[in-house]
């Protein structure tokens, strides 16, 4: 492909040289017409060759973008269109010029609107550019059929040139195309105006970073558009001022065409200066907390809309910083995607403004610089996800355990207790029926009843220990008072939430206080305990403080460990402070949305 | 005396009906659900309704709700609620209304038919009946600075019986003393504990329970 570009450049250079020579040769021009001075002609074709060269260089450097080929084609069309005044005696030269001349407008509009990717973004742009091509090709066809180079018109004056050729396709002469030329001029001005508006809109909408890159090329487009509109406006007005005769128009066109390579160079220079932004990024990532890579990249790339997707191999999906799945936008959605890392094992994906693609090297450099930070962030996202899963599974286990306890308690009350009561009633009836003649049997029955009552008492206590019905039915406050009432060490309940809380929170708080009070009774040798349960915002704080001997070992006994598990399952925290001689203080915080 | 019984366990319902019948209490109706009970009660007008707190469909406090409904529809009817466990909060909620004719007992009290019939008679007579187990639990609460320590043993006994809902006369009979002696004890208790002075009815039970519970 590079050989093709080299050949094209050689062709472009030869063409410019040939035109330069032709411009100096009076033989090539209709009699009575003045052409550019040698200096101006040299400048003009140097600038034209520069435009071709820049098109080819962009093509070479950014093969993935259509900008290079389009710019090359537009520059060639620009140069070829000049075959008309200089080679109008050659039918081939004239035909090429008549096709190239209208295409210049379409190709430049295309390259400016498609910058930087070389692909047109919206359906509006595609339709617009397609209709320009259709219009300009129609113009070319009309000229091929009817253009009469024998009556060359300059400044409204027809210059007869009998030795000049005739319309290339029909070989006729003496057609007056002034009317068609006016229509063409008017429509072309309209096309240029619309294209300029679309380019300006693109500049306004772009994110700040990409805008800085788009701006030089966009401004060059607007300069060229302004120049083009003036030239076609002059032609429409029938003015004698044109490129060949007016120094002003010549300089205006030279500046407008020169602006294109200058703008591209400025864009490249800006890309180079953004290397220092990458250096800043490296330093910033060094010191930034996890989770801030997206913001740092967005700053470096100048695209606040940048989205970061971290690749989770287990899920085979990209997730954002919060672990939510990130759908990559489809092609043509107005957003571009850059995947970092190898294709089969990506690290992350950047979803960004498509204009950033013009800064491929900046994107690659920033991606490489952020690679370790991203790898780190990805591992953390993975870890967070697993942690979340572990926590929710633990919460499910605790919930299932509570559910089971409640069921067991209900079964004891509604099953075993009912049966024992039924049995007791039967015993009572039997005793009444026996009367006195049963020879001690009544006493035996009374003993059995006493046993039964003891069994019922134990059953009730057992059921309460498994899961207090009062907690299920009346909530934490009532259940805590009931706990306090049964504690052998005097308990003060400073505060307890009166409303109902979520079941797992009530159960955790209840069992915490229950276990703490049991420990106080067993080990603390305390004279009083203070229980305080308050809801503060979205947390429930549980405190159990005794005035006992302290020195409790948190690792002692499975009771407290089980409680810690229960608290952690709710994503809460548990702390035990028990310095010898300072009592024991249990503090728990339970999230309670 | 005519009673209606509601309990979702047929074995208990039948057993209780037979025990009560043996003790000379007429069982006018039996029901397995709260709705069924409400329907029977409207037509049969028993003196007292005996019902379990836990009943279908959720086995939480359907009996409680049914009791409130019965008292609303038939203020003259006594209600005796049986519970698998006793709890001061429940008791105080039950006693919120001032008109007595209410009882709250552990379910296993049905195993002592004499006590059960006595409770039924007291409820029918307009008194309030509170389970001794609940009163004992409230009285046994330990406190660093326990005002109950200021009471004599006899006064404690009287206080417990007040909390169980007994009238002065009832207390006198239970303790084999004269009503005058009971009145003296009660005056001392009220003074020592700074209890509100209330007429001898349901309100006194509530005041005593509330005092013991909040202490």
Image: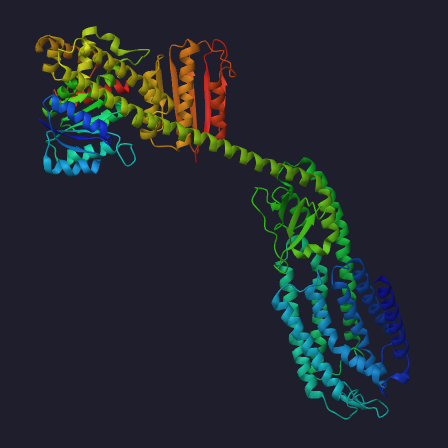
The C terminus of chain A appears in which quarter of the rendering? top left
The N terminus of chain A appears in which quarter of the rendering? bottom right
Please identify the quarter of the rendering in which residue A475 is found.
Answer: top left
Left or right of residue A283, residue B141 in this image: left
The foreground one among A553 and A526 is A553
The foreground one among A20 and B132 is B132
Q: Residue at x 77, y 75 (%)?
A: A249
Establish if A224 lies above or below B7: below
Left or right of residue A449, residue A523 in this image: right
Q: Position of residue B138 (x, y in %)?
A: 26, 17
Q: Position of residue A27 (x, y in %)?
A: 90, 85
Q: Residue at x 85, y 82 (%)?
A: A87
The foreground one among A119 and A199 is A119
Establish if B61 lies above or below A135: above
Q: Position of residue A16 (x, y in %)?
A: 87, 72
Q: Position of residue A236 (x, y in %)?
A: 69, 82
Residue A561 visible somewhere in the drawing: yes
Please identify the quarter of the rendering in which residue A207 is found.
Answer: bottom right
Establish if A344 lies above or below A489: below
Left or right of residue B29, residue A118 in this image: right
């Amino acid at each position: 492909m590079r050989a093709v570009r080299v050949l094209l450049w050689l062709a472009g250079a030869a063409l410019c040289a040939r035109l330069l020579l032709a411009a100096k040769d009076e033989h090539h021009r209709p009699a009575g017409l003045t052409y550019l001075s040698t200096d101006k002609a040299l400048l003009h074709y140097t600038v034209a060759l520069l435009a071709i060269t820049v098109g080819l260089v962009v093509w070479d450097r950014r093969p993935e973008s259509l900008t290079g080929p389009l710019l090359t084609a537009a520059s060639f069309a620009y140069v070829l269109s000049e075959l008309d005044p200089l080679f109008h005696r050659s039918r081939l030269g004239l035909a090429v010029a008549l096709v190239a001349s209208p295409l210049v407008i379409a190709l430049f509009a295309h390259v400016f609107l498609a910058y930087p990717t070389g692909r047109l973004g919206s359906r509006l742009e595609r339709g617009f550019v397609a209709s320009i091509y259709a219009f300009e090709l129609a113009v070319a066809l009309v000229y091929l059929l009817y253009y009469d180079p024998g009556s060359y018109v300059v400044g409204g004056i027809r210059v007869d040139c009998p030795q000049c050729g005739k319309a290339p396709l029909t070989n006729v002469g003496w057609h007056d195309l002034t009317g068609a030329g006016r229509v063409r001029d008017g429509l072309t001005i309209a096309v240029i105006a619309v294209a300029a508006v679309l380019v300006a809109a693109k500049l306004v909408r772009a994110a700040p970073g990409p805008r800085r890159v788009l701006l030089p090329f966009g401004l060059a487009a607007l300069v060229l558009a302004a120049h083009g509109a003036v030239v076609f406006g002059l032609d429409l007005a029938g003015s004698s001022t044109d490129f060949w005769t007016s120094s002003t128009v010549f300089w205006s066109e030279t500046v407008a065409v020169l602006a294109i390579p200058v703008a591209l160079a400025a864009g490249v220079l800006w890309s180079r200066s953004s290397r220092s932004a990458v250096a800043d990024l490296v330093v910033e990532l060094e010191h930034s907390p996890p989770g801030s890579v997206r913001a740092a990249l967005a700053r470096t790339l100048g695209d606040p809309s940048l989205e970061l997707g971290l690749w989770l191999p287990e899920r085979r999906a990209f997730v954002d910083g919060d672990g939510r799945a990130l759908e990559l936008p489809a092609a043509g959605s107005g957003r571009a995607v850059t995947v970092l890392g190898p294709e089969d094992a990506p690290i992350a994906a950047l979803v960004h403004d498509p204009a950033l693609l013009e800064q491929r090297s900046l994107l690659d450099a920033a991606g490489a610089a952020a690679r370790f930070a991203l790898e780190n962030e990805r591992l953390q996202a993975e870890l967070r996800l697993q942690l979340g899963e572990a926590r929710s599974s633990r919460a499910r286990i605790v919930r299932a355990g509570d559910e089971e306890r409640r069921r067991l308690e209900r079964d004891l009350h509604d099953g075993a207790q009912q049966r024992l009561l039924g049995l007791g009633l039967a015993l009572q009836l039997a005793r009444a029926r026996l009367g006195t003649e049963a020879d001690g049997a009544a006493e035996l029955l009374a003993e059995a009843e006493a046993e039964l009552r003891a069994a019922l008492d134990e059953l009730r206590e057992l059921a309460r220990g498994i899961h207090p019905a009062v907690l299920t039915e009346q909530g934490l406050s009532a259940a805590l008072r009931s706990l306090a009432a049964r504690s052998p060490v005097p308990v003060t309940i400073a505060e307890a939430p009166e409303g109902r809380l979520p079941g797992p929170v009530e159960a955790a708080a209840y069992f915490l206080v229950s276990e703490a009070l049991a420990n106080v009774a067993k080990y603390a040798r305390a004279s009083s305990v203070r229980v305080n349960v308050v809801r503060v915002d979205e947390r429930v704080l549980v405190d159990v403080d005794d005035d006992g001997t302290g020195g409790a070992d948190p690792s002692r006994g499975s009771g407290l460990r089980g409680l810690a598990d229960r608290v952690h399952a709710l994503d809460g925290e548990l702390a035990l402070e028990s310095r010898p001689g300072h009592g024991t203080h249990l503090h728990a915080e339970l999230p309670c949305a | 005396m005519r009673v209606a019984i509601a309990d979702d366990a047929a074995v208990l319902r039948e057993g209780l009906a037979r025990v009560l019948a043996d003790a000379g209490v007429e069982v006018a109706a039996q029901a397995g659900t709260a709705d069924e009970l409400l329907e029977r009660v409207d037509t049969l007008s028993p003196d007292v309704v005996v019902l379990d707190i836990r009943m279908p469909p959720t086995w939480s406090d359907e009996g409680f709700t049914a009791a409130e409904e019965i008292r609303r529809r038939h203020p003259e009817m006594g209600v005796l609620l049986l519970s698998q466990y006793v709890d001061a909060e429940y008791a105080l909620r039950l006693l919120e209304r001032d008109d007595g004719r209410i009882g709250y007992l552990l379910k296993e009290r049905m195993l002592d038919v004499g006590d059960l019939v006595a409770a039924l008679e007291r409820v029918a007579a307009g008194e309030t009946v509170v389970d001794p187990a609940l009163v004992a639990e409230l009285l046994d609460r330990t406190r660093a600075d326990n005002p109950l320590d200021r009471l004599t043993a006899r006064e404690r006994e009287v206080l417990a019986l007040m909390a169980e809902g007994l009238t002065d006369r009832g207390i006198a009979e239970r303790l084999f003393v004269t009503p005058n002696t009971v009145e003296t004890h009660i005056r001392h208790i009220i003074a020592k504990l700074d209890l509100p002075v209330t007429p001898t009815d349901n309100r006194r039970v509530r005041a005593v329970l509330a005092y013991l519970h909040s202490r």
